[in-house]
Amino acid sequence: MQDQPRIALLYSVPLLREALLEVFEDIAEVQAFPAARGDTTGLLRSVSPDAVVVDNADEAENAAPWAKLHGLPLVFISLRERKIKLLKNGGWEESPGTDAETVRNLLAGSMFRREGATG
């Protein structure tokens, strides 16, 4: 569906990819790419997503300047720390846990606010 937001997912853990594809089904178009393949900025520029999700610290670092520049939400799922981090207003806000529903809720809230919803 053309009206759905596009999420770029850069993943290291295939099971996480599957969980996120399922939780975003009928909500957003997820374009998934294996992480650590180089030129993260070029990939994001080409895909032109409405949000970015990563599960790798290096990809989070690489995607952060691009997300900040475009004012788009970036979610870093830190499986090692068992936290989800949302890049917001230039800094990282943390949420406990690493479940797919938390990622969905963070992104839905960020994208709808970004599109003009206030409450």
Image: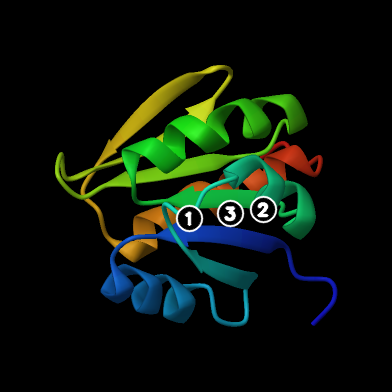
Of mark 1 and mark 3, the one earlier in the sequence is: 1
Tell me if 107 is positioned left or right of 115 in this view.
Answer: left
Q: Position of residue 71 (x, y in %)?
A: 72, 31
- For the point 27% across and 75% down, the residue is 15
Of mark 1 and mark 2, the one earlier in the sequence is: 1
Note whether 62 is above or below 107 in the view shown.
above
- For the point 73% across and 25% down, the residue is 69
Crowding at dot 2, Cα within 10 Å, few <14 / some 14-19 / many 20+, comes out as some
Note whether 16 is above or below 104 in the view shown.
below
Which residue is nearer to you in this view: 23 or 70? 70
Q: Position of residue 57 (x, y in %)?
A: 33, 38
Amino acid at pointer 1: Arg
Tell me if 45 is positioned left or right of 86 in this view.
Answer: right
What residue did someone put label 2 on?
A: 43
Distance in Å between CA atoms under marks 1 and 2: 10 Å
Crowding at dot 1, Cα within 10 Å, few <14 / some 14-19 / many 20+, comes out as few
**Numbered disc 1: secondary structure:** loop
What residue did someone put label 1 on?
A: 37
Tell me if 24 is positioned left or right of 31 in this view.
Answer: left
Amino acid at pointer 3: Ala
What residue did someone put label 3 on?
A: 108
Whether tag 1 and tag 2 are in contact, CB under 8 A, the answer is yes
